[in-house]
Amino acid sequence: MSSPLALHGGQPVRTAPFPAWPVHGPREEELALEVLRSGQWWRYTLGEAVDPTQSPSKVAEFQQKFAAAHACKYGIACVNGTAALEISLKALGVKPGDEVIVPPYTFIATASAPMLIGAVPVFCDIDINTLNLDPAKLEAAITPKTRAIIPVHFAGLPADMAAILAIANRHGIPVLEDAAHAHGGTWNNQPMGSIAAMATFSFQASKNMTAGEGGIVVTNDEKLAEIAESLVWVGRKKGRPWYEHHRLGWNYRLTEFQAAILLAQLERLEEQTKTRQNNGAYLTAKLTHIPGIKPMAVPAYATGHAWHIYCLRFLESEFGTTREKFLEALTAEGVPASSGYAHSLFNNPMYGESHAHYNETCPASNQACHEAVWMEHRYLLGTQSDMDDIATAIAKVQANAKNL
Ligand SMILES: Cc1ncc(COP(=O)(O)O)c(C=O)c1O
């Protein structure tokens, strides 16, 4: 009997595409055209408007609205999420040679941002059930040189902030949330981004809100906001002359075009987040019983998963085949998925062998690199029947695992 798998000539579960990303419509067009036609593609937003007859800057409006949507008083828009991390670390007083604790299962920016300002990332392992920084391992990573801790809300699942903050506060170390995956989500009913001293978001093309590129720093601390803004504006200071620089800063400003697109994207965020949450929970319920498929845990504090990635762990021996063959078969069934981060950050070629010792202290991160399966958040913008297709395709591949 021939195999029903699409790989071997059988019918794929799905031939229709999943929803496309980014979602955009007349609001993006309207706001972007407004900027285009105004000829004011760049605006002064550091303090008072230079020309009070000008309509308000879209960057200023976006900063205020995005920050407010995340329960923060201040938002400082910038070129990308990596820059937002650099700015925040500098604002928090991190200096060359200082240590910054980061998880190793994240995008390189979480570790490269400290390095780009001369600091040293120290890797602390993740919890294999949540794929977020493991508070049980945190204390051991702290040294007299530790000046900041960056938990990542990986995939949109909140990190265990109560436990992390308790340890950080005991040592007097500030915490910076890397919320690049966490737009619109909540931890204990509080928006991610408003939990620690500062937080950063990314608006790069794959993120849950995007202008192609972009980033923002948010905080409730006026002093930190002032420093962050100055850093984005080449060290300028509110109310002081244009060619007067008060600190070493960057030109990390966002353009009015990007802010126009982001204003429109923000209007859709709440509804899209709800759709992702409903579909994410529904899909998890359908996948939980398939042998070898382990969706990420959703602890009680994760009141609003932001679902940037639908991530699960693939256990080869229980499922009955390798992850590589599974991904190939699943793609043939019309549900493309990926294996995510290829390496724990410390095993990236840029470090050579110098960070090999982290293989001893961070086994869960290596396990995640070996087991993870990622699906893009755009799938979760589909219908319940789309989720049924994903579950059917995975179950079909599992039932036929021995034939792969
Ligand atoms: C966890 C995390 N942090 C930071 C960043 C950096 O953002 P960007 O690509 O906008 O520099 C990313 C994104 O790509 C990310 O996934």
Image (cartoon, rainbow, N blue to C red):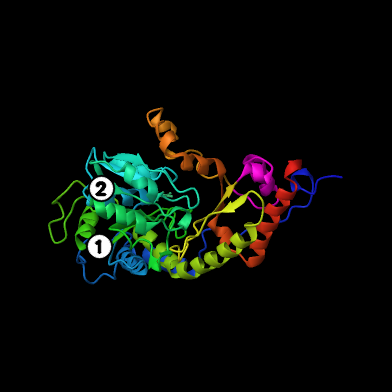
Q: From this viewpoint, which residue is outermost toward the right?
A: 1
Residue 98 falls left or right of residue 138: left
Question: In this view of the protein, which residue sits in the foreground, 62 or 143?
Answer: 143
Circle 2 sits in a helix, a strand or a loop, which is it?
A: loop
Left/right of residue 149 with respect to residue 248 in the rendered view: right
**Count of all numbered marks drawn on residues in the image:** 2
Residue type, mark 1 in image = Thr
- The numbered disc on residue 250 is 2
Magenta part of the protein: which range?
Answer: 315-337
Q: Residue at x 62, y 58 (%)?
A: 18
* Relative side of 22 to 251, left or right: right
Judged by its main secondary structure, the magenta piece is: helix
Q: Amino acid at mark 2?
A: Trp
Quadrant assignment, res 40: bottom left
Give percent across and percent down for residue 295: 57, 54
In the image, 47 versus 132, the foreground residue is 132
- The C terminus - image quarter: top right
Is residue 246 magenta-colored? no
Residue 78 in view here:
no
Label 1 element class: loop
Residue at 29% from the left image edge and 57% from the top image edge: 198
Residue position marked by numbered label 1 in the rendering: 45
Residue 331 belongs to magenta span: yes
Q: Which corner quadrant of the image does residue 160 belong to?
A: bottom left
Residue at mark 1: C-beta within 8 A of ligand 1: no
Image location of residue 279, percent across then percent down: 58, 65
Where does the N terminus fall, quadrant-wise?
top right
Alpha-carbon span between mark 1 and mark 2: 15 Å
Bin the neighbour count of mark 1 within 10 Å (Cα to Cα): few under 14, some 14-19, many 20 and up: some
Q: Residue 282: x and y, percent?
A: 60, 65
- How packed mark 2 is, by other alpha carbons closer than 10 Å (few <14, some 14-19, many 20 or more), is some
Residue placed at 33% from the left, 40% from the top? 121
